[in-house]
Amino acid sequence: MAVPPQFTEVVKETEDKMNKAVEFFITELRGIRSGRATPGLLENVRAEYNGTPTPLKQIANISVPEPRVIVVRPFNVADLKTIENGIAKANLGFSINNDGRLIRVTVPPLSEEGRQRFVGQVKDMAEKAKVSIRNIRRDSNQKAKQYEKDSKLSKDDSKRLQDKIQELVTTYEGKVAQKLEEKTKEISEI
C-alpha cells in the first residue's frame, strides 16, 4: 500500500520542528553554568563592536585551557577593552583578568545553593522544550485531521499518521530528558 504524500510531508515537517526544539534546548543549556568552565558560558555575551552589541564568538576566539579558566583572544587586540566591559556587564560572577593580549576569565566553583538554582533552571528549560514538542504534536494532529476531512487522507491513514506523530513525541521528549539528565549530572559534579 502506497503512503500518501501528505503523510510523508506531515511526518517530515513534524520531525524537523521537533528537532529544532531539541536543538534550541541544547543551545540554551550551553549557557548554563556547571562546575567547570565551557566556551558556551561566554559565546553569547555581547560586547560593543563598531557601535553594535556583538556576540563575543564573532569577535574573539573562546577556549578553555583549564577546568576553571576561559581564555578570550580577540581577533583584533584593539577590541580587548570593549570585550572586557561586555563580560563585566554580563554580571556572571566571574573574575576577569586582562593582560593586554587576551582575557582570562576565572569561573569560581558553585555553591550548593547555586547548583540547586541552576538545576531548577535547567528543569524549567526542559519542561518548556517538552511543551514546545507537544504543541508541535497538536498542530500536526490538526493537520492530519484536516487532511482526513478534506479527503486527502483516509481515516486509517490519518490514524496511522497520528500514531507516527506520537512516536516522534516520545522520541524527542526522550532526547530532552537525556540532555536534562546529562546537564543535571554535570552541574552536580564537584
Image: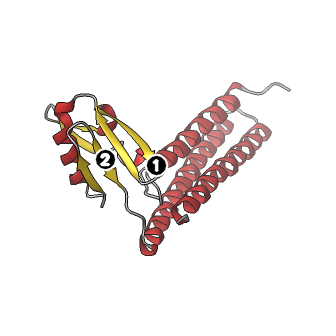
Residue at image position (77%, 37%) is 157
Q: Quadrant of the N terminus?
A: top right
Determine the residue located farthest toward the bottom in the rendered image: 113
Indicate the secondary structure of the residue bearing disc 2: strand
User: Earlier along the polypeptide chain: callout 1 or callout 2?
Assistant: 1
Q: CA distance from mark 1 to mark 2?
A: 19 Å
Quarter location, residue 8: top right
Residue 187 placement, left or right of 149: left
Q: Quadrant of residue 159?
A: top right
Q: Which mark is residue 104?
A: 2
Q: Amino acid at mark 1?
A: Arg
Residues at discs 1 and 2 in contact (Cβ within 8 Å): no
Give the x, y percent position of residue 82. Answer: 17, 41
Q: Which residue is mark 1?
A: 30
Residue 180 falls in image quadrant: bottom right
Quick one: SS at disc 1? helix
Residue 188 location in percent, x, y? Answer: 54, 66
Answer left or right for 14 relative to 72: right
